[in-house]
Amino acid sequence: MTDDEFYVPLNIPDPRAELRDEDVDRALTLVGTHPYFNGKHFHIPSSLVEIIEKIGLKINPERSFMFRLIPNGTGGIHLDGNLKSIRPHGINFSWNAARTEMHWFEKKQPDDYIFHNSVLLPYFNPDRSKLVFSKILTGCNLVNLTYPHRVKNLTNENRLSLSIGIAEDLSWDEFKKVLQDNGLVKS
């Protein structure tokens, strides 16, 4: 397996300046180890909308999220989505925590399902999950979410992350190719 099966660094400008203070403040006050809210509830930066529309795609607010991970926290192993739909990829920006490590695990059936925010989500027991790749990510990256995965905050600060999903049902390989063909993948 190669790095580009799990993530690719992108040539997309940092959109943080366009985030509204109230959205960032709200993310910082979320309760729990790794809470989130979706793009129906925050302003998606217009620069990102323009970049995605320029390549003929659209951002889906329901597949876009803002996350917070507590200092030195580790999120649970998960897939992004629910029983009906798993999000295969995300364009991710993280800030506040310069050292964020992402872990990808062997593809397998979930060990169980749990209710979270009134949604039934797949659960993966860490003791029965085999790590296949990990990487400290910085800047903007396209991340492969078809593998069970988790994030580890290696700092004493809250980690905030913006994860953008598209409306089109493209596979990891299809979306990665669209981004490459449009010069958005760093070489």
Image (tube, rainbow, N blue to C red):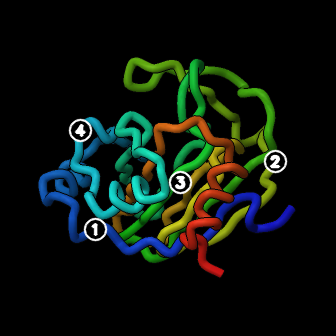
User: Residue 59: percent from the left, percent from the top?
Assistant: 40, 45
Kindly state the secondary structure of the residue where label 1 is placed.
Answer: helix
Q: Specify few, some or many for label 1: CA neighbours under 10 Å numbering under 14, 14-19, or 20 or more.
A: some
The amino acid marked with disc number 1 is Arg
**Labels 2 and 4: the sequence-earlier one:** 4
Residue lying at 44% horizontally and 25% vertically, measured from the top left:
116
**Labels 2 and 1: the sequence-earlier one:** 1
Kindly state the secondary structure of the residue where label 4 is placed.
Answer: helix
The amino acid marked with disc number 3 is Thr
Q: Are marks 3 and 2 in contact (CB under 8 Å)?
A: no
User: Residue 42: percent from the left, percent from the top?
Assistant: 23, 45
Kindly state the secondary structure of the residue where label 3 is placed.
Answer: loop
Which circle marks residue 16 in the picture? 1
Kindly state the secondary structure of the residue where label 2 is placed.
Answer: loop
Q: Which residue is mark 3?
A: 74
Q: Nearer the viewer, residue 45 or 109?
A: 45
Q: How far, Cα to Cα, is label 3 from label 2?
A: 16 Å
**Labels 3 and 1: the sequence-earlier one:** 1
Q: Which residue is mark 2?
A: 130
Q: Are marks 2 and 1 in contact (CB under 8 Å)?
A: no
Residue lying at 34% horizontally and 54% vertically, measured from the top left:
49
Residue lying at 43% horizontally and 50% vertically, measured from the top left:
164
Q: How far, Cα to Cα, is label 2 from label 4?
A: 35 Å
The amino acid marked with disc number 4 is His
Q: How far, Cα to Cα, is label 3 from label 4?
A: 24 Å
